Image (cartoon, helix red, strand yellow):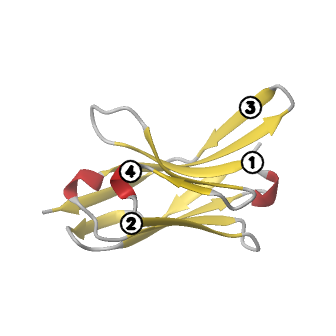
Amino acid sequence: QVQLVEYGGGSVQAGGSLRLSCAASTNILTINRMGWYRQAPGNQRELVASVTSGGSTDYADSVKGRFTISTDNAENTVYLQMNSLKPEDTAVYYCSARRDRGWSTYDYWGQGTQVTVSS
């Protein structure tokens, strides 16, 4: 089992910045992929950014150049730095962890943190 706890959500005006943190209960180097997802009301949950245990990153087109995902392996924490925020970034943001074990994949989720961007 992997427990994930997110911090750092809040309200900000358009153009502002926020940093989200996700603390994992285990060594994140044992997790194949850490990611941030978001879900706005009426929308499906979507991938925002991810990072593999090897350090490869991936971003949704809508956040490229504005958001950065990073890790602190010593603290077992994943960050999402969000700059130049837009009202359409408003959503609940979820931290996720994926472990591959043979033929099985295990996904773990945090409780979510609200990000609200006002125009």
What residue is pinned by disc 2? 65
Q: CA distance from mark 2 to mark 4?
A: 9 Å
Mark 1 neighbour density, 10 Å: few (under 14) some (14–19) many (20 or more):
some
Residue 22, percent from left and from top: 58, 61
**Which residue was labeled with disc 3?**
105
Q: Position of residue 58 (x, y in %)?
A: 54, 53
Of 42 and 60, the residue lying toward us: 60
Residue type, numbered disc 2: Gly
Mark 4, other Cα within 10 Å: few <14 / some 14–19 / many ≥20: few
Q: Are marks 3 and 1 in contact (CB under 8 Å)?
A: no
- Residue 100 appears in view: yes
> Disc 1 designates what residue?
32
State the quadrant of the C terminus: bottom left
- Counting residues from the start of the chain, the first of labels 2 and 3 encountered is 2
Where residue 90 appears, as percent x and y from the top left, is 28, 53
Q: Earlier in the sequence, mark 1 or mark 2?
A: 1
